[in-house]
Amino acid sequence: MSDFDIKNQSLAEGGRRRIEWANREMPVLSQIKERFEKEKPLKGIRMSACLHVTAETANLMKTLQAGGADVVLVASNPLSTQDDVAASLVINEEIPVHAIKGEDNATYYKHIESALAHKPQITMDDGADLVSTIHKNHRDLLPEILGGTEETTTGVIRLRAMAADNALMFPVMAVNDAMTKHFFDNRYGTGQSTLDGIIRATNILLAGKVFVVAGYGWCGRGLAQKARGMGANVVVTEVDTLKALEAVMDGFRVMPMIEAAKIGDIFCTVTGDINVIDTHHFEVMKDGAIVANSGHFNCELNIPGLESLSVNKYLVRPFVDGYELKDGRRIHILGEGRLINLASAEGHPASVMDMSFANQALAAEYMIKNHAKMENKVYSVPEEIDREIARIKLSAMGIDVDVLTEEQVNYLNSWEEGT
């Protein structure tokens, strides 16, 4: 196989071991793979996936391949690729991969083009880059596309905006909206892996620090809880009054970012919006402030704005860039403002991605079976898929739950019985 672009084929053995290690924590996806091998529900379907190239993603690719799919994988973030995993998929599984950790923007978009050269019938996105590129530059591919899946909050926002403008030309399943995805992946996965990335990059002690979390969605909730658990004094910033109230009731201080910027030691954005930490916020930060992002794109931090305030930029240590301001203060940006949990760490734990990628696999299967009766809009994952994933996960953990009796079912469905 010659159609791939990776860093080094000799890394494949290490990648294979990493993939196998992750698979031990992914029992739901393993069960789906066993069924897919027997039933081949994806047989002959061309699939292009733009996802973080990690060991967990590799197990999803192997599952899709087992189901009969002809799959190509490219990176959804220039800093998230695990080069040994990419090598293993190419050498050991013969899955074309176009991804190199640290690739520049030109290479990133060249790889997107490689994914689209595959002429996909199903797209699998983490940020909607495949879908948006198809609609902007490759509308000739639209007639053959059955549908797509989207993994992230950011991507779902972009796709819903397209649908609202009647610009979306094929149906997409919002995998991110599944309870077994956003409730667990976003809350527990992002919470733990973001702190892992910050600590690996800086080796700082969180206890006693003022830790500012921008955004109190599912990712922000998880991050705030984990940071508090590490002893940090957590401040939350929000634009949504309901989420701000929830953060207050959960015991966190809530204030505007301009106020938080004056007191914070560590900042992390998890909103999916642009310029959440802006130039005027950088202007008032303390000397030595550390700033990271765990939303999807690095536009959450106005890095050009910070550069305009700076007289010097220098590398402090891997994944830590120092910016010296005109008055001598120093501000540190982690991982170039990209996803810090993947830039300097390994992303979410495999046991969490097990459920997220189970949703991806089953959503793709559902799309193939039902695309003919689906409209060009964003769909939520059917509840029966969500609950089946939860059932398999609990079973794999050795946990049983109660089952309603016939009497209880009748009671819950009746309006005639009361107090």
Image: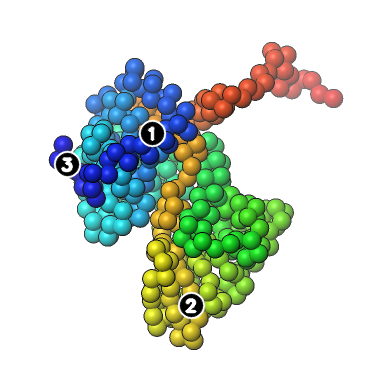
Q: Which residue lies furthest to the right in this view?
A: 419
- How crowded is the residue under tag 3: few (<14 C-alpha within 10 Å), some, or many (20+)? few
Residue 415 at what x, y percent from top left? 74, 22
Kind of residue at disc 3 = Asp
Mark 3 or 1: in front is 1
- Where is the N terminus found, in terms of image quarters? top left
Q: Residue furthest left?
A: 2
Kind of residue at disc 1 = Glu
Q: Residue at x 38, y 33 (%)?
A: 20
Determine whether the residue tagged by mark 3 lies in a helix, strand or loop.
loop
Tag 1 residue: 20
Q: How is the image coloured?
A: rainbow
- Where is the C terminus found, in terms of image quarters? top right
Q: Residue at x 23, y 37 (%)?
A: 91
Q: Which residue is drawn at 53% across and 36% down?
A: 180
Q: Mark 3 to mark 2: distance in Å?
A: 45 Å
Indicate the quadrant where residue 67 lies.
Answer: top left
Q: Nearer the viewer, residue 19 or 251?
A: 19
- How crowded is the residue under tag 1: few (<14 C-alpha within 10 Å), some, or many (20+)? some
Q: Is residue 140 left or right of residue 65?
A: left
Tag 2 residue: 330
Residue 380 visible in the picture: no
Instruction: Compare marks 3 and 2 and give the one earlier in the sequence.
Output: 3
Tag 3 residue: 3
Is 408 above or below relative to 169? above
